[in-house]
Each structure stands twice: as C-alpha cells, then as structure tokens.
C-alpha cells in the first residue's frame, strides 16, 4: 500500500509541474502563430502591386516642423510616401523602414518651408527624396518613390 501511495504522489507531483508547463508551451505556440499572421497581414495592408515584379510599399506618415528662414515663419508638413521595390525584397522593408524615414527627414530638414509650399515643388521634392533614399547605401533596391500626399499646416 505504501508503494502504491508513493507512486500516486509521484504521479501527482509530475502532473502538478508538467501541466502548467505544457499549457504555457501551447500558449507560446498559439501566440507566435497569431503574431506571424498579424505581421504578414500588416505588411500586405501597406503593399500595392504595381507591375509583375514590383510593388508599392506605403511608409508611415512623416510629420515634421519646418522653418522658412524668415523669423516667425514656420509650419508643419505631413508626407505620405510610398516606395517602389521588387516583390522579392518586400519582407526586408520593415527592417530598413526607420533608416528610410531618417533619409527622408534628413532631406526635408534642408528645405525651405516657403519653397516647398509652391505648386511647382512637387517634382523636385520627389526627385530629391528619391535621390536621398536611393543614395543612402541601403541594401534594398528602391526603384522609385510616390508622394501620395503633401500637406502644409
């Protein structure tokens, strides 16, 4: 009878420790699957197919305060920018997104707010942003950029 009780106590102790560990492991697996699914869905929300081999990846909105060089004249600019990349490189974009945004900010900080507000500025701003992003020694091949929105406040 004593050996029988010892076996039950041992079985109880093993199950007492093993069950929470098993449940924690199952929770970990479910969480990782959910995170992977949401990450892929979030990436695909920001992607638009352009041609057979390239896609447009929407960067997060860039909002910054700028000065015009004239005392007392300043404003805020909000940019919605997309970059055209090869479909094979889409999964690498989120890793380099902060660096791309830094290149955008570095270019925009050098510009004059009043010059940016002129209607003819859209062309040279797009060209300058494209040069800033592609000239930044990124391991991603950026084929072009699209300025979806440029709002001045």
Image (cartoon, rainbow, N blue to C red):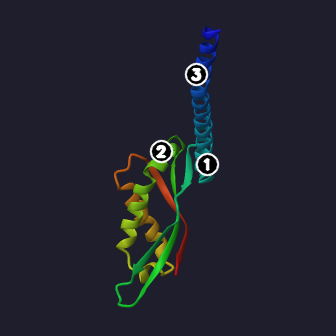
Binning the other alpha carbons within 10 Å of mark 1 as few (below 14), some (14 to 19) or many (20 upward) gives some
Position of 108 relative to 132 (above/below): below
Q: Do residues under tags 1 and 3 come within 8 Å of each other at their CB atoms?
A: no
What kind of element bears circle 2?
helix
Q: Among all residues in the image, which is located at the extreme front?
A: 2
Query: Between residues 96 and 24, which one lies in front from this camera angle?
Result: 24
Q: Residue at x 34, y 73 (%)?
A: 110
Give the residue pinned by disc 2.
Answer: 92
Determine which of the numbered discs, if any, sits on residue 1 in the image.
none
What kind of element bears circle 1?
helix
* C-alpha span from label 1 to label 2: 13 Å
Quadrant of the frame with the N terminus: top right
Q: Where is residue 140 drawn, in percent x and y?
A: 42, 47
Binning the other alpha carbons within 10 Å of mark 3 as few (below 14), some (14 to 19) or many (20 upward) gives few
Q: Residue at x 39, y 46 (%)?
A: 139
Q: Is residue 43 left or right of residue 141?
A: right
Give the residue pinned by disc 3.
Answer: 14
Q: Among all residues in the image, which is located at the extreme bottom?
A: 72
Image quadrant where residue 4 sits: top right
Q: Is residue 79 left or right of residue 129?
A: right
């Amino acid at each position: 009878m004593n050996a029988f009780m010892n076996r039950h106590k041992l079985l109880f102790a093993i199950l007492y420790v093993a069950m929470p560990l098993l449940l924690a492991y199952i929770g970990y697996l479910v969480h990782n699957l959910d995170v992977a699914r949401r990450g892929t869905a979030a990436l695909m929300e920001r992607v638009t197919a352009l041609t057979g081999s390239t896609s447009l990846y929407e960067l997060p909105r860039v909002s910054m305060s700028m000065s015009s060089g004239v005392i007392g004249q300043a404003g805020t600019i909000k940019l919605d920018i997309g970059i055209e990349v090869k479909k094979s490189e889409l999964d690498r974009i989120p890793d380099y997104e902060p660096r791309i945004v830094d290149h955008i900010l570095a270019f925009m900080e050098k510009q004059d707010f009043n010059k940016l507000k002129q209607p003819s500025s859209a062309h040279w701003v797009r060209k300058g942003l494209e040069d800033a992003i592609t000239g930044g020694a990124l391991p991603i091949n950026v084929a072009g950029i699209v300025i979806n929105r440029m709002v001045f406040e």
